[in-house]
Amino acid sequence: MGLRFIFMLTANDKTVEDAEIHLGTALAAGIHHIGFKDIGLSFERLKNLNSAIKSGGATSYLEVVSLDKKSEIISAKAAIEIGVDILMGGTNINEVLKLLKGTNIKYFPFPGKIVGYPSSLLGTVNEIVKSAKTLSLKKGVHGLDLLAYRSTCDVKTLINAVCECTEKPVIIAGSIDNRHRISNVKNSGAASFTIGSAALNGKYFSAEKNLDLQLKAIMKDVAEVNNHISKLYPKNLNHSFGEFEDIWSPRIAGQINDMQIKLVKVKGNFIWHYHKTEDELFFVHKGKLMMKFRDRDEIIKEGEFIIVPYGVEHCPVAITDVCEIVLLEPKTTINTGSIKNVRKV
């Protein structure tokens, strides 16, 4: 699955006033995980915001930053009524767990000592790890929301230590504003991370303040860190066939899992043969091909294809002078099948 990016519609620990506009930008950019804080907007707007997130096909997150018990309980009740998918943050775990019992909301509380506003994480690495272990053992706690980049200790050491102490997923929050920090989070084994202010304020991608480009820069970095960037580019069949002249000698042009895409030029008759375990697809790019079977002959014209199942004896014949064919077949396929022949490739 890889490291997840959670876009927070927040700045300075508040849901921003124009959150609805930014949500539209995020959904259009293909963001699948979107969150907001329990303060900043009215309850009705937060409820509508959550509905819009889920209607857009994204997972919704509500992060509690209220520090006193009473406010946190109010926020937890609001999360239930709003219907968020994941509740993050908070420090009054036992009280919140009672409220969440019987709901489908996943709970990721803060480990360690949280103080101030905007929130900061205090304590040594050992103290925070001890808290993380304790929380992880509680039934109903699905993971942890670690304010690593608002910590007073070495952040990289902290993230690694917390991720190592629990098998439950860890979300890294705080001031993540560059690819280096994303890479550190990925290498630690964390499941997700949040970015809000850095994107909204145009600080992540310094070349352009536009939110759409900020989000695209973040997603590109996440994809590269996850090794989810494709190294493949379009190939032109005319150009590819023009690179060789050999007849009845398939060239591998690509591979999809265990299936290979092969290009072959054929002229005249091949040999009768069959394949013990491999199906084959013949797509005619140029020319005309006749596929001879023991019970009939089939003509395949340009733009058409035929599938030859394994075990079926067949003999390809080029009706035109040279016929260009795209083959799709398992990588174990030998062109002459079970027959020993000088044309074997």
Image (spheres, rainbow, N blue to C red):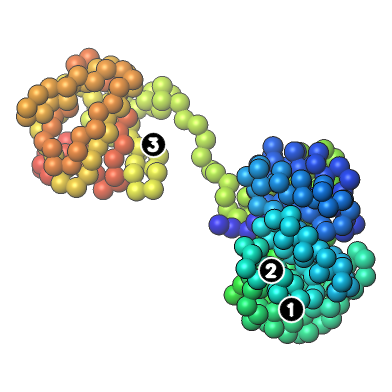
Type of the residue with mark 3: Ala
Q: Nearer the viewer, residue 246 or 123?
A: 123
Q: Is residue 184 shown above or below 305?
A: below
Q: SS class of the residue under badge 1?
A: helix
Where is residue 203 shown, x and y percent of the image? 85, 48
Whether residue 148 is visible, yes or no, is: no
Q: SS class of the residue under badge 2?
A: helix
Type of the residue with mark 2: Leu
Residue at 27%, 17% (x, y): give it. 301
State which mark lies toward you, 1 or 3.
1
Type of the residue with mark 1: Asn
User: Dot 3 corresponds to which residue?
Assistant: 253
Q: Is residue 60 shown above or below 329?
A: below
Image quarter of the N terminus: bottom right
How far is the residue under mark 2 from the one under mark 3?
Answer: 54 Å
Q: Nearer the viewer, residue 115 or 277?
A: 115
For disc 2, the neighbor class at 10 Å (few under 14, some 14 to 19, many from 20) is some
Residue at 41%, 25% (x, y): give it. 237
In the displayed structure image, the side of residue 294 where residue 15 appears, left or right? right
Where is residue 230 shown, x and y percent of the image? 54, 44
Q: Earlier in the sequence, mark 2 or mark 3?
A: 2
In the displayed structure image, the side of residue 151 where residue 249 appears, left or right? left
User: Dot 2 corresponds to which residue?
Assistant: 100
User: Dot 1 corresponds to which residue?
Assistant: 94
Q: Earlier in the sequence, mark 1 or mark 2?
A: 1
Where is residue 64 shown, x and y percent of the image? 81, 64
